[in-house]
Amino acid sequence: MISKRVQEIPFSGIRKFFELVQKSKDVVSLGVGEPDFPTPEPLKDAGIRAIESDHTSYTSNYGLLELRQKISGKLKKKNGIRRNPENEILITVGVSEALDLAIRAILNPGEEILVPEPSYVSYKPNIWFAYGNPVPVPTREENEFRLEPEEIEKRITKKTKAILIASPNNPTGSVLRKKDLEEIADIAMEHDLIVISDEIYEELIYDNEKHYSIGSFNGMEDRTITLNGFSKAYAFTGWRLGYATGNSEIIEAMMKIHQYTMLCAPTIAQYAALNAFEHESYVRDMVREYDRRRKLLVKGLNEIPGISCIMPKGAFYVFPNIKETGMKSEKFAEKLLFEGRVAVVPGSTFGDSGEGYVRCSYSVSRENISEALARIGKFMEGLR
Ligand code: PLP
C-alpha cells in the first residue's frame, strides 16, 4: 500500500529512541528539543481573546496581513532584510512546513541540496520526499562545528541547487560567524545557488555572539529563503507557527503548495503571535536562564573523566564528545539510559559525522541538569 519512496525513508532516530525512553522509569531526560518554559502570558492571553472573539476561521493563504506586516518590520529592524508583507512573506505551520515548501518549490527530481552535518533530522527526509538528493557537508568539533566553505565548494556539482544552513545549529549549538556567512554567500553567487537559511534559534545566542542573516547580504536578497518561527524563542512549539521570506517568485511558488496542502497556518496562533515582538523581555529572561544552564552543563560534563565538551554559542544543546568510551553513540545512549537513567540523543541520529557524540539539551531545570550530571558521572565511573 505504501509508496516506495516513503518505504525507503527511515523513521526519525529521535522517535525510535524516545519510544525506549517512554518505556523507562525514573529517567532524567536531556533529550528534549523544545523550551521547557510556558508560552509568555501576553501571547497566551491574545490566543484566548482570539477564540473568544471568534477569530476561528481561515486566514488568507499567506497568513494574516497584520502579522506579515509585523514580521516585515521585525525583519527590517533585526535582520536587515527588507520584504514586502503583501507577497514576500508566507506564514506557515512552523518552520517545519516552511522548510518542506522551500525545498519542494525549488527542487527538480535528482537535484542536490548541500546540508551541513550533524544537523536537524528533518532536512534530509524533506529533500528525499521532494525526490532530491541531500549531500552532507561534514562539520568538525575542531572548527566548533561551523560550516567550512571549502567543504561546501568541494561538493558542488552540476546538480547542486541550494545550500541549506542553520545557525545556531541543532544539535551542535554552533553559530556561524559573519565571515563564514560571507564566504558561503560568495560561493552561492559564484555557482548560482539558492540558500535556505533556517534561523529558528536566532534569539538563543550567548557570549555576545551575534546573529547574522545571510539574506541581508549584498547580492543574496533574491537567492535566499529565510525561515524563522516562534517555536523556540517564544516557547510556542505546540501553536505551530513559522514564516518564510524571500523574493516574490519563490514565496508565491511556496504559497501555491501551501494553498493546496495546508490552506493557512492556525488562525488562533497567528492572532496570539501578533504582538510577540513587543514582548521580547520574556525572550531575554528565558535566554538568561538557558545561559546559566549551558554553563552548568558544559562545566559539569568536562569534569567527568572520559567526556569532553566544547562551549556552544547558541540554541539549547551541547554536543559532548564520548569517543574515549570506545562506544558508538547509539550504544552509549542506550547504556546510559538503561544503566545511568539519563536520556540523551545519539549524535549519529543527526548524520554520520555526529558519530562519537551525543546531544544533551539544557531546556530542563538546573536541578535536573545537576541530577543528570551526577548520574552520568556515576555511569562513567562504572565503565572504567
Ligand atoms: N529547524 C530546526 C533546526 C529545529 O530544531 C526545529 C525543531 O526542533 C525546527 C526547524 C522545526 O520547528 P517548528 O516548530 O517551527 O516546526
Image (cartoon, rainbow, N blue to C red):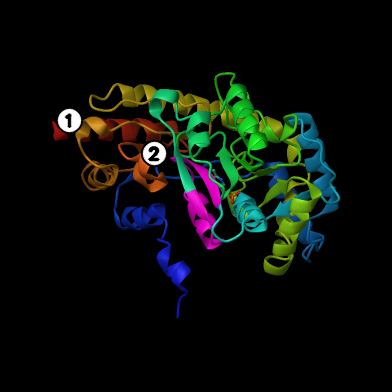
Which one is nearer the viewer's eye here, 31 or 226?
226
In this rendering, does residue 378 appear at all? no
Disc number for residue 381: 1
Residue that mark 2 sits on: 359
Looking at the image, residue 106 sits to the left or right of residue 129; the answer is right
Q: Residue at x 54, y 62 (%)?
A: 131
Q: Distance between the residues labelled 2 and 1?
A: 20 Å
- For disc 1, the neighbor class at 10 Å (few under 14, some 14 to 19, many from 20) is few
Q: Which of marks 2 and 1 is nearer the N terminus?
A: 2
> Magenta region: which residues?
112-134
Evaluate if marks 2 and 1 touch, with contact meaning CB atoms under 8 Å apart: no
Quick check: is 220 in the magenta stretch?
no
The amino acid at mark 2 is Arg
Tell me where residue 253 sits by quadrant. bottom right
Label 2 residue SS: strand
Task: Give x and y (percent) for residue 98.
Answer: 65, 52
Quadrant into which the C terminus falls? top left
- Which residue shows up at 38% across the image and 53% down it? 13
The x, y position of residue 376, in whole percent, is 27, 34
